[in-house]
Image (cartoon, coloured by chain):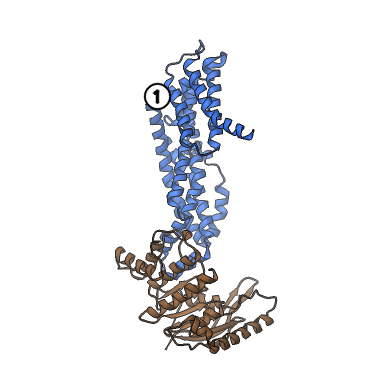
Chain colours: A brown, B blue
Amino acid sequence: MAKLKFENVYLEYHDKNDYYSALEDVNFEIKEGEFVSIIGSSGCGKSTTLSILSGLKDPTKGTFYIDEKESHGTSINRAVVFQNYSLFPWMTTKKNISFGIKQVEKHKSKKEIEKIAKQYLNAVGLDGIDNKYPYQLSGGMRQRVAIARTLAMEPEILLMDEPFGAVDAKTRVVLQDMLLELLERGNEKKTIVMVTHDIDEAILLSDRVFFMADKKIAKEFQVDFARPRNRQDIFATSKYKELRQEIMSYFYKDVKENIGNEEVVL
Amino acid sequence: MKKILQNFFKILPHLLFVALLLVIIFLPDSKDVEIENKIPFIIVAIIFEVQLLLQWKKAAIYDVTSIVFLILLIWDFKATKFATGRKLLLPSPENVFQIFVSDYPKIIEGLISSFRLLGIGFLFALVLGVVFGMITGWFTRVYDTVMPIVKVISPIPAIIYTPYAIACLPSFQIAQIFVLAISMFWGIFLNIVYRVSHVEKEIVDSARTLNLSSSSMFFHILFPYSVPSVINALSGSLTSAFMVLTAAEMIGARSGLGWFVKYYSDYADYTRVVAGIIIIGIVVTVLNIVIKFADQKLVRWH
């Protein structure tokens, strides 16, 4: 049974004298517990796909299913980590996480919620910053808190829109490893979709990689490294190098076809 | 050379302070002037000296204090020590500051009266401004309907309504509250409308993915997000509302600081008039300090 399914999904904007399409006939199925990364150059439709998955946008044509049921709008079994701004700047770290939990566990007492919040802060390696505001944290710490908030909500589906896109290279490695470890630790496997433009990140974390180009899914890649995964081991294999090479070639082909159209970030 | 000059400006306020004290105490007063009590004026001078000593680290405070002492010194020379014909119009500082002591029940009464009106008007403006501001800023349909009308009405200075409001409404107090509420309402309303209608898309998206109810969206997201703009609006409109109030009190009130100044100027009691003006200056300063404090306390996340 597919956890998430797109069936002939289109997203088009009609203005008075403007027509713009962001997605054209996108089809895919994602199984429960699967980790899928969507990569592609800017404007390929990967962020729009995530917006539909998160319920922020509804398809203008076609259908989006969760658990084989048609889905419209947001729901509490999905949680999203954005590149920036997932956190509310007027709430302290602890409040931010508690606020997320409160939306799911409406009956829980304040004390219980704060205890859970503390556990998850601890899990992402942050202690003693409960009462700090987001502006007082580094970009990497903010993303840790954002991940802690989404995980604390214990969603069935975790969606991430370039979660490590705004942090420096070193922090990114640390956060990727942390995410890998956290995902192994959970007792039930979450279904995860992550948008990224980092090929290594996509291969390291996911079971499948969707390569999007020109508002469609152009190619799917299977990533069958065994879990738990280790960065060094995987990057050393020839399988990894071949896969990376193959994805890169699609990137280059896309770049050549769209030269001058979009800025491509690899 | 530069160093010497710098040091001179650091010592200057202290020299002026000593000079001022000596002049107040030892220089004989002009024969035409009756001085009841010099102590309040001396205390004022000491207050300025103490605040200088407390803020000795800030460079600008030295020059500011020097100028204040210089003004007090000139004032004392002109109005007390060498007073000539126009002493009625220029009251002596000793007597002005003595009013703070002798008339203090009347001043407190005036303050309470003014602040009660200001407070009630403020509450109305705050509640209505925040509620309507958030609704107008959030719903595009409401925004498109309301804003063209608002753009016509909001620039009308609130004080213009005063005579009409006094005529229409049952009492001067109610008319005054109405005018005050309007004078503060537009600032709060427009600031909130702007802030809410320009809320970062990422914040809204983040809130929407938490599947918030619309009441939660307003109370937990849009309201806290708007607080800085309320404070921003207040820093301008609270003091200008106070000005509206004092000006209006000169027209029809029987209490309040504006009335105090108007009443005594009718009797040519310029000692009390100047005292009243100084008190209004102090009140406005205190209001601004309170707003600044609220800004630091409430919007620490900004």
Left or right relative to B298: residue A40: right
Residue drawn at x 36%, y 81% is: A188
The image quarter in which residue B4 lies:
top right
- Answer whether residue B268 is visible to the viewer in this image: no
* Residue B143: percent from left, percent from top: 53, 58
Q: Is residue A196 above or below residue B77?
A: below
Residue drawn at x 52%, y 52% is: B191
Q: Is residue B195 above or below residue B179?
A: below
B61 or A134: nearer the eye? B61
* Residue A53: percent from left, percent from top: 48, 78
- Which chain letter goes with mark 1? B
User: What is the residue that sits farthest to the top in this orientation?
Assistant: B31
The image quarter in which residue A243 lies:
bottom right
Dot 1 lies on which element? helix
Left or right relative to B103: residue B162: right
Q: Is residue A185 above or below residue A144?
A: below
* Residue A106: percent from left, percent from top: 33, 68
Left or right relative to A117: residue A210: right
User: Residue under circle 1?
Assistant: B101
* Residue A96: percent from left, percent from top: 41, 64
Q: Amino acid at mark 1?
A: Val
Residue drawn at x 55%, y 26% is: B71
B270 or B163: nearer the eye? B270
* Rendered-image quadrant of the N terminus of chain B: top right
- Answer whether residue B197 is visible to the viewer in this image: yes
Task: State how many labels appear.
Answer: 1
